[in-house]
């Protein structure tokens, strides 16, 4: 996929007049080829607004190709990850219908570059959130139900060598997402105290709770609702919101099977197809997560 008339990844001083287009083309080429690219911060520097302009340019290209938006995801919600980036705010990305994986289904080999997994709380909205500043009551009234979720994050940036501008430009590292199938109303939950266990091939690999997500997954959703409303792209009825990781993000590989349990919400599962016979098993494996950081 090309976003402009030509694709180039030659370095240029950050912030040049065509930096957004060049960064978008670099990421688009990596997505089309399945070969991760160099970071885009050489083009964007630390300009987060420019990084979002890249993300929005790539989103517009996907919509022009017929993709359908199904919601948004929130990233960088844990204090540890915020400290890693030296920032005090989350980021967001866009979810598309072709990113949704049915509960218990299998993700094809190579579908996500350098995949990693995290367990989350998903909110599904029943009303628009259009105010510049929302209250918890606004969010509670607007939410139809919550579901357990597994998000498969992926990076088109080689070896996950990312800073904030890189992950923002790369759609907040969105890859695939899996939702549980038992909707639970919010009045039956205390999401702050909801514990989470994520298992890989039956072995516990990540634990956490709602408090790890900006203190409460509802706080993360409020940040997103306010941010998008101010930008003129408010959350709408029917949108799915992935509120952020409840515990450490874990690497995954071909043949892995994941199950997440979130207190009060139940379980959600996903598997990864095994590598085809003869596939390269070293660091060039498109499903390799070695060296990833998030």
Image (cartoon, grey):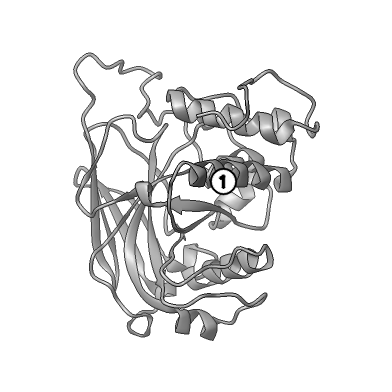
**Residue 91, quarter of picture:** bottom right
The foreground one among 178 and 9 is 9
Q: Position of residue 140 (x, y in %)?
A: 46, 82
Residue shown at the point (56%, 31%) measured from the top left: 27
227 left or right of 151?
Answer: right
Q: Is 102 located above or below residue 139 in the figure?
A: above
Q: Is residue 174 visible?
A: yes
Residue shown at the point (68%, 52%) measured from the top left: 87
The foreground one among 206 and 240 is 240
226 left or right of 151?
Answer: right
- Labels in figure, total: 1
Residue shown at the point (36%, 46%) measured from the top left: 98
Q: Position of residue 289 (x, y in %)?
A: 40, 31
Residue shown at the point (32%, 83%) measured from the top left: 188
Q: Position of residue 255 (x, y in %)?
A: 21, 33
Q: Position of residue 285 (x, y in %)?
A: 36, 22
**Residue 125, quarter of picture:** bottom left
Neighbourhood count class around disc 1 (C-alpha, 10 Å): few under 14, some 14–19, many 20 upward: some
Q: Is 174 located above or below residue 17 in the figure?
A: below
Q: Which residue is mark 1?
A: 60
Q: Tell me the element at label 1.
A: helix
Q: Is residue 158 visible?
A: no
């Amino acid at each position: 996929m090309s976003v402009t008339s030509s694709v180039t990844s030659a370095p240029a001083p950050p912030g040049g007049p065509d930096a957004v287009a060049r960064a978008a083309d670099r990421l688009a080429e990596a997505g089309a080829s399945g070969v991760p690219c160099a970071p885009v911060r050489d083009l964007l520097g630390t300009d987060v607004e420019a990084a979002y302009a890249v993300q929005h340019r790539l989103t517009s290209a996907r919509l022009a190709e017929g993709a359908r938006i199904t919601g948004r995801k929130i990233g960088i919600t844990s204090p540890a990850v915020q400290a890693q980036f030296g920032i005090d705010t989350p980021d967001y990305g866009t979810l598309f219908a072709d990113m949704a994986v049915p509960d218990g289904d299998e993700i094809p080999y190579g579908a996500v570059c350098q995949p990693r997994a995290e367990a989350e709380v998903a909110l599904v909205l029943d009303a628009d959130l259009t105010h510049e500043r929302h209250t918890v009551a606004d969010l509670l009234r607007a939410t139809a139900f919550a579901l357990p979720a597994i998000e498969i994050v992926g990076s088109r940036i080689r070896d996950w060598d990312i800073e904030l501008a890189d992950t923002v430009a790369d759609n907040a590292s969105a890859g695939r997402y899996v939702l549980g199938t038992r909707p639970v109303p919010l009045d039956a939950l205390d999401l702050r105290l909801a514990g989470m266990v994520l298992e890989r091939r039956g072995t516990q690999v990540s634990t956490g709770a709602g408090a790890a997500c900006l203190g409460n997954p509802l706080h993360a959703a409020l940040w997103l609702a306010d941010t998008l409303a101010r930008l003129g792209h408010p959350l709408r009825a029917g949108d799915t919101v992935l509120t952020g990781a409840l515990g450490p993000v874990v690497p995954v590989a071909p043949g892995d099977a994941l199950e997440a349990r979130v207190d009060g919400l139940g379980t959600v599962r996903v598997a990864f197809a095994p590598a085809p016979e003869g596939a390269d098993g070293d660091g060039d494996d498109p499903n390799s997560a070695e060296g990833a950081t998030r």
